[in-house]
Image (cartoon, rainbow, N blue to C red):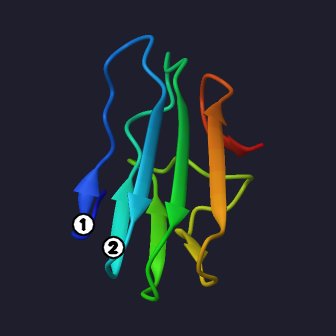
């Protein structure tokens, strides 16, 4: 469980799941060479944002992705340069 702003893990070959309860921003590591899967789920009633490093994007957007609904999750995977929601 996560309830404060935090960088996402970046250990190679590891998939990450974050259950987020507080108003929190999860910052993804670089997408370059990253083969990990990241799932972020909002379990609380506070806003959860997913941000990137540098000028990388999530589905083409350079703005953080916001999860506004409780119990909704977003899973992202790298294409080697940026992030894609799956």
Q: Is residue 74 left or right of residue 6?
A: right
Residue drawn at the location 31% of the way across and 79% of the way down: 22
Say which residue label 2 marks.
Answer: 24
- Which percent across, then down, holds residue 40? 52, 54
Q: Residues within 10 Å of mark 1 (few under 14, many from 20)?
A: some
- Which percent across, then down, holds residue 74? 65, 56
Quarter of the figure that contains the N terminus: bottom left
Residue drawn at the location 56% of the way across and 45% of the way down: 39
Say which residue label 1 marks.
Answer: 5
- Which percent across, then down, holds residue 42? 51, 70
22 and 86: which is toward the camera: 22
Q: Is residue 22 left or right of residue 72?
A: left
Q: Of helix, strand and loop, which one carries label 1?
A: loop
Disc 1 to disc 2, C-alpha distance: 5 Å
Residue at far right of view: 86
The quarter of the picture where residue 76 lies is top right
**Residues at marks 1 and 2 touching, judged by CB atoms closer than 8 Å:** yes
3 and 62: which is toward the camera: 3
Q: Earlier in the sequence, mark 1 or mark 2?
A: 1
Quarter of the figure that contains the C terminus: top right
**Above or below, comparing residue 62 to residue 39 in the picture:** below
């Amino acid at each position: 469980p996560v309830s404060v702003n935090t960088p996402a893990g970046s250990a190679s070959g590891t998939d990450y799941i974050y259950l987020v309860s507080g108003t929190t921003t999860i910052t993804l590591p670089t997408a370059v060479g990253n083969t990990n899967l990241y799932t972020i789920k909002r379990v609380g009633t506070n806003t959860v944002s997913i941000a990137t490093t540098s000028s990388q994007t999530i589905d083409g957007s350079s703005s953080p992705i916001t999860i506004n609904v409780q119990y909704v999750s977003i899973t992202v995977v790298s294409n080697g340069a940026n992030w894609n929601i799956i």
